[in-house]
């Protein structure tokens, strides 16, 4: 949608057509909240209104073949569409892990359609014991939503040592886990599900340590695989990680064909390695690049890798992360220093609604370049991380952050005297000067 809207606004005289196979799509990021928080699932429909308004034609059909030489897309209905530019934005397929019993009735993957979500919502509301496979952000958000909205017993099984292990350092993972445990969620970390038992209907899941968890519903939120079938069958280059290869302008190796979003290659901002980061925010940035550059390069190298800027809300608290964590620095061989700070997000902190805001910033040792940041606290964390994200992309230095000019207000922000973003930078700077110990 964003590629189409961007292309139409940059090239208003071109005709733009969007083909999608799901007629009743939903806004994916709000899927977990369709269980209880959103009163009517229809309120999360992804409508075609903006496309209609921009005079973009929408065809509800499935693209089944791509002919690169003839610049032709064949649809399941038998229709063919000829293009002079093509953008593949086929997303990803939810992964179903190779677990015995994964096809048992009562096991649900996450599908981005209203009909599928209506079914899952009903099943979640009836279920008494729910097991969620996967403790990434999708699993954690579902667990929080279900545990706070119903009396169902909720279990999360995660094979890593902590929830959201790839996005956060331990102390933030621990805060997220504590919020979920306070809501009554049972966590099974460092564990895999080996079988889903029941036959006609799910009855339990068995973990690799032999524990059996009774369950009448299993939700699978273990990520997915880029949906590249159309591109692969047409001979486009596919990466080792299974994505459509693209350059910095979202161009595939085939002339006049672009790819964006979950189906397209993601490179890490710092290492340029292929990384499994699939976010709507990254997808839309790529869509704007492709839509703008579709008839010639107008915007130069704006996406030089993903910084995986990400936020979520668990147990009424916001958590956010961007760039490298300390753990990630260690794994990739970066020398780093970090600064931490906590302050109320109102001043004075006695004001109604004030919450402690935790900020951790990670800088390159010696150079002092901002590599990453994490934050937890009230709702302002959702935008604070975007400031950090810009800082990472612009490769801000610790001194620039230490001297940063900011706006503050008692009802809106931390006090200027203790602002945790600046204080975290200040602390890291002291370490860089050798005045404090690391980490
Ligand atoms: C539960 C959940 C919560 C999420 N929360 C967040 C969040 O808070 N923040 C965030 O940044 N990201 C979030 N994401 C990730 C985000 O949803 C994805 O990164 C984003 O949707 C990717 O956009 P896309 O256009 O690449 O793919 P999609 O949104 O999956 O769209 C691809 C579309 O292409 C269609 N399609 C595929 N093949 C064909 C074909 N052959 N013919 C026609 N149509 C086809 C699909 O049916 C689909 O409609 C979440 C994802 C989920 C599942």
Image (cartoon, helix red, strand yellow):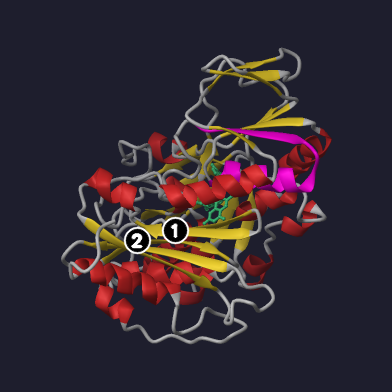
Q: Residue at x 33, y 55 (%)?
A: 324
Mark 2–mark 1 CB contact (< 8 Å)? yes
Residue 40 as seen in the image, left or right of residue 243: right
Number of numbered discs:
2
Residue visible at 19% across and 61% down in the picture: 365
Percent x, y of residue 56: 60, 66
Q: Does dot 2 land on a helix, a strand or a loop?
A: strand
| Numbered range of the magenta stretch | 137-158
The residue at 64%/40% (across/down) is 111
The secondary element bearing badge 1 is classed as strand
Visible residue check, residue 84: no
Specify whether residue 224 is painted magenta. no
Q: Residue 94: horizontal and vertical position, in percent?
A: 55, 36
- Mark 1 lies within 8 Å of ligand 1 (Cβ measured): no
Say whether residue 428 is left or right of residue 13. Answer: left
Query: Residue 14 — which label?
Result: none
**Residue 273 shows up from this direction:** yes
Tell me where residue 82 appears, x and y as whole percent.
48, 52
Nearest the eye: 131 or 186: 186
How crowded pointer 1 is (Cα within 10 Å; few <14, some 14-19, many 20+) is rated as: many
Which is nearer the N-term, disc 2 or disc 1? Answer: 1
Per the model, the C-alpha gap separating discs 2 and 1 is 8 Å
Q: Which residue is under mark 2?
A: 372
Based on the displayed image, in which of its 4 quarters is residue 51 positioned?
Answer: bottom right
Q: Nearer the viewer, residue 128 or 218?
A: 128
The answer to if 139 sits in the magenta stretch is: yes
Q: What residue does disc 1 label?
A: 321
Neighbor class of circle 2 (other Cα within 10 Å; few <14, some 14-19, many 20+) is: many
Please identify the residue farthest to the left as the structure is shown: 366
Quarter of the figure that contains the N terminus: bottom right
Please say if 394 is above or below 102.
below
């Amino acid at each position: 949608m964003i590629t189409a809207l961007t292309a139409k606004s940059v090239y208003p005289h071109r005709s733009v057509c969007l083909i999608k196979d799901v007629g009743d799509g939903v806004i994916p990021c709000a899927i977990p909240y369709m269980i209880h928080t959103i009163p009517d699932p229809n309120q999360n429909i992804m409508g075609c209104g903006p496309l209609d308004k921009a005079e973009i034609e929408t065809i509800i059909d499935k693209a089944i073949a791509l002919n690169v030489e003839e610049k032709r897309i064949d649809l399941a209905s038998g229709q063919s569409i000829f293009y002079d530019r093509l953008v593949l934005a086929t997303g990803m397929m939810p992964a179903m892990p190779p677990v015995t019993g994964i096809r048992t009735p009562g096991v649900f993957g996450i599908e981005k359609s209203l009909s599928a979500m209506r079914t899952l919502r009903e099943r979640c509301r009836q279920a008494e014991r729910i097991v969620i496979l996967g403790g990434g952000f999708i699993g954690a958000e579902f667990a929080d939503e279900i545990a706070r909205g119903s009396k169902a017993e909720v279990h999360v099984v995660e094979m890593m040592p902590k929830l959201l292990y790839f996005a956060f350092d331990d102390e933030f993972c621990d805060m997220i886990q504590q919020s979920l445990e306070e809501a009554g969620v049972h966590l099974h970390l460092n564990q895999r599900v080996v079988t889903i038992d029941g036959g006609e209907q799910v009855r339990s899941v068995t973990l690799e340590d032999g524990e059996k968890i009774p369950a009448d519903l299993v939700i699978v939120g273990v990520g997915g695989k880029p949906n590249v079938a159309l591109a692969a069958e047409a001979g486009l280059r596919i990466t080792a990680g299974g994505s459509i290869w693209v350059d910095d302008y979202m161009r595939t190796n085939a002339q006049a064909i672009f790819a964006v979003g979950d189906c397209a290659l993601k490179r890490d901002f710092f290492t340029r390695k292929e990384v499994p980061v699939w976010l709507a925010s990254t997808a839309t940035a790529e869509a704007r690049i492709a839509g703008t550059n579709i008839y010639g390069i107008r915007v130069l190298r704006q996406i030089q890798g993903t910084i995986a800027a990400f936020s979520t809300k668990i147990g009424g608290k916001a958590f956010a992360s961007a760039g490298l964590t300390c753990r990630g620095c260690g794994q990739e061989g970066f020398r780093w220093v970090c600064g931490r700070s906590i302050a109320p997000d109102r001043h004075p902190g006695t004001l109604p609604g004030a919450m402690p805001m935790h900020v951790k910033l990670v800088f390159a040792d010696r150079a002092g370049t901002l590599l990453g940041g994490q934050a937890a606290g009230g709702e302002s964390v959702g935008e604070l991380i975007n400031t950090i994200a810009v800082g990472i992309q612009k490769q801000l230095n610790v001194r620039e952050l230490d001297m940063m000019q900011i706006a503050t207000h008692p009802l809106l922000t931390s006090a200027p005297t203790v602002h945790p973003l600046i204080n975290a930078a200040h602390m890291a700077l002291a370490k860089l000067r050798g005045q404090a110990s690391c980490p």
